[in-house]
Image (spheres, helix red, strand yellow):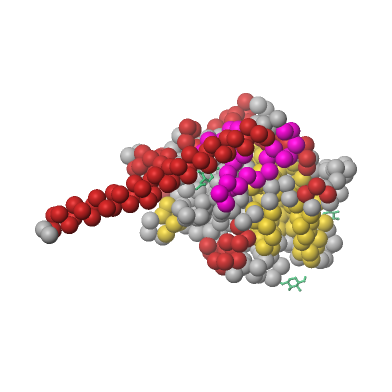
Amino acid sequence: MPRTTVFRKSLKILRHISLYGIIFPYTSYAFYVSLKTNWEITKRKDDHTILKYTPLKICGRYENPFEEYRIQTVYEFFINRIIELFETNRGGIPIDQARMNTLMPIHKPTWTTTTSVNGVNTSKEILSDPIDSITLMDTFALSKNKDSTRSTANLDVTWLGQSCSFILYNNSLKILTDPLFTNFLISPKFGPKRITKLPCSIEDVPQPDIILVSHNHPDHLDELSLKTWANKENVTWIVPKGLGTFLKKNYDIKNYIELSWWQSAKITTKNLHKTYFVHCTPAMHWSGRSLLDSNESLWCTFLVKEQGCSQNFLFHGGDTGYVKDLFKMIRARYGDVKLAILPCGQYCPQWHQKPRHINPTEVLNIMKDLHAQNVLGVHWGTFVLSGEYFREPKEKLEFLAEWEGVSQNCYCPELGNTQQF
Ligand SMILES: *[C@@H]1O[C@H](CO)[C@@H](O)[C@H](O)[C@H]1NC(C)=O
Ligand SMILES: *[C@@H]1O[C@H](CO)[C@@H](O)[C@H](O)[C@H]1NC(C)=O
Ligand SMILES: *[C@@H]1O[C@H](CO)[C@@H](O)[C@H](O)[C@H]1NC(C)=O
Ligand SMILES: *[C@@H]1O[C@H](CO)[C@@H](O)[C@H](O)[C@H]1NC(C)=O
């Protein structure tokens, strides 16, 4: 057989395989999932209890049970990546480093706010209060909130990029959210690379008592953090359902606890004998670290509070789209929030991003829905993963907050700078 015939024949077989082996089955699968999801959403439509937003699993993968959601197929995903290739200067990052430094100042974290005595800045010493026990609570055993005091203790918050923040509660409980300490997402060569430097290296971070992970996308959970805090004494990973299996299988991590939406963990500490609650609440997003594992684990948001306070001191927003009754429902069940750290970037183009990412207007909606006293806007200024100008999330959020008269309580922090609430 001549070479060209062999070539043409193999091309035909290949086309056959991709059409009948991949494209046809995948399209039918996506079609089925979309129908089934919509059917389930319609069925739950008139439910006003939390059952409306309990996790939905179809063919072994989680799907979003929200009316606002629209399925994203791999076709949409790749079409968007191709469109992006034609955009020049995405994110509008200045070439001039000095200009970038003024637009995005980066501070060396002190972790606690400093007090100045005779011109010498000193930061408070962080008390060591390791976790004694952490137990899963029965979702429906949670009694109605009877505590009535507001959270008076100090919160020191340091934003480190994307949704990664270090939070110190009352100078003792150390919380790290969506850990990220690498300069790239996929590989050092192919990036995507950070557009702003890390405020500190991972060794400089005080050892967290708990690490809250909203989902497994690489910009919310990096390999270095996994390796650094794998099986570390006095460190507990709190992750959404299904992610623990991944931690165990790939990194042999045993110091974790998995929570599903509306599930809670009760934490007691060794030295100060404190009791804290971590509530896992729904988010509209998706998960996956490779093409094949998408939605095998859940995505979520978290609330944290100390026993005896009616107010949760923290809401960790991770990565989510806006659902009109969801955040009201979260507040009705668990009470008000002192500080909500919410994503505010990666919303362009809206037709593509809206089902998975909130924009600054929606940040302000969530602030109202949750009765959040303070909001910090994060998830911007770290990578260029969407179409908007890189500082637009900050500028828009702060403009809108000013307009609504809440500019003192709702803004975007500077990288590495510790803020006290
Ligand atoms: C994963 O979930 C998201 C959100 O529900 C959906 O858009 C996507 O199509 C799902 N992927 C798979 C493979 O099920
Ligand atoms: C002390 O802190 C203030 C305010 O944060 C800062 O302006 C000043 O430079 C600091 N001084 C020293 C010696 O680090
Ligand atoms: C904060 O810590 C201090 C000192 O450990 C303690 O006296 C105070 O009661 C704590 N506040 C709250 C609200 O837990
Ligand atoms: C863990 O906590 C215990 C009890 O407070 C303490 O003795 C131990 O040194 C801590 N270990 C690490 C690695 O911090």
Name the image quarter holding the N terminus: bottom left
Residue 301 spot, x, y in % from top left: 66, 46
Along the viewing direction, whichever of 103 and 330 lies nearer the viewer: 330
Residue at (67%, 35%) from the top-left corner? 44
Residue 54 spot, x, y in % from top left: 68, 43
Q: Is residue 130 visible?
A: yes
- Examine the image and state in which quarter residue 175 appears: bottom right
Q: Is residue 412 visible?
A: no
Residue at (48%, 50%) from the top-left corner? 196
Looking at the rendering, the stretch of residues picked out in magenta corresponds to 47-71
Along the viewing direction, whichever of 11 and 241 lies nearer the viewer: 11
- What secondary structure is the magenta-colored segment mainly? loop
Residue at (60%, 33%) from the top-left corner? 67
Is 145 colored magenta in this rendering? no
Is 61 colored magenta in this rendering? yes
Residue 353 spot, x, y in % from top left: 50, 37
**Could you tell whether 333 is left or right of 324 in the image?**
right
Residue at (18%, 55%) from the top-left corner? 7
